Amino acid sequence: MARVSQTCNPLLAAGILGLAGCGGSGGAGVTAAPAPTPAALYGIALGNLQIAAALYQDSNRTPAGFYADPAPPGEAYVSTYHVRSSDVAAGVTTDYELCTDDWNQALSWSEAAAGTGTGYANLVNNSSTSHYFEFDRIGAGTPQVYVRQRVYLCSYLDRSDTVAGVSPGPAGTLNQRPISAAELGQLSEYLWRFTSWNNYGNAVLASEPDPVATGMTHSLVVAALVANGAAPGCDRIEVSAWQHAVDTTSGALTRTLTPLWSFNAQQSGNAAVSCGT
């Protein structure tokens, strides 16, 4: 009788808690190797309590080599954002990050956005990259805030189909060609900077091409602290994969959020200890 082979998906077999393995008989005297946990699949060497301690200390939110966007030298307070449809028109039905290849149009949107809020921010500099126009302003009030307004080039990225946040769904259209895994990874890391994860209690544990997804997909493995969400005195740590997939023909981007595992912890000095169940 011919032997029937089966394919095992290690991530599905591992499950959210990473406890189950890919079973099946491998013949007499052969033991199937246990499925890698989600942490192992994404190359994460930190244990759960090390992850929790990093979230409590807020010392470093990203791994080595992650996309950097340093503040201008000598500026103590810097705010960076992409101009949105709601910044330039009242009562819009959809709120998304704008794009144009026309510098004058971008400047017009920058001016409109600068006039909203508590006071007009004066334009002090402007620049451009292959990805966006930037307009730098000094905000009104004390302390003085250096504001970096950005407008995507449509020739790079069109986000008009994208709802703000990290929820699953469309993530825009990447118009740059050729489309490469490296470019998708850089875009994923850049977009992270404008999410709620770029704050205390959150960290990126890994950034790499997704090891189990089909097609060109990049994953950021993010850990988030959910304070007092389990038992008295316990916090919940939730680890998920934030994935951006791109259709290499059309450039259409899709984002998903896949829970990987979770655990309880609480802070103890500069460390973290287990608690609850």
Image (tube, rainbow, N blue to C red):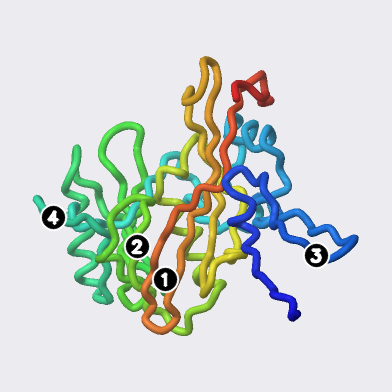
Left or right of 56 on screen, residue 125: left
The spot of residue 55 in percent (x, y) is 58, 34
Mark 1 = which residue?
129
Q: Nearer the viewer, residue 180 or 34?
A: 34
Quadrant of the frame with the C terminus: top right
Task: Indicate the secondary structure of the residue bearing disc 1.
Answer: loop
Mark 3 = which residue?
26
Say what amino acid the circle numbered 3 marks. Answer: Gly
Tell me whether circle 2 and circle 1 mark residues in contact (CB < 8 Å): yes
Tell me whether circle 3 and circle 1 mark residues in contact (CB < 8 Å): no
Residue sitting at the far front: 1
Mark 4 = which residue?
93
Q: Which disc is residue 221 wearing?
A: none
Q: Nearer the viewer, residue 233 or 26?
A: 26
Crowding at mark 2 (Cα within 10 Å: few <14, some 14-19, many 20+): many
Say what amino acid the circle numbered 2 marks. Answer: Glu
Tell me the quarter of the picture where residue 263 sits: top right
Say what amino acid the circle numbered 1 marks. Answer: Thr
Crowding at mark 1 (Cα within 10 Å: few <14, some 14-19, many 20+): few
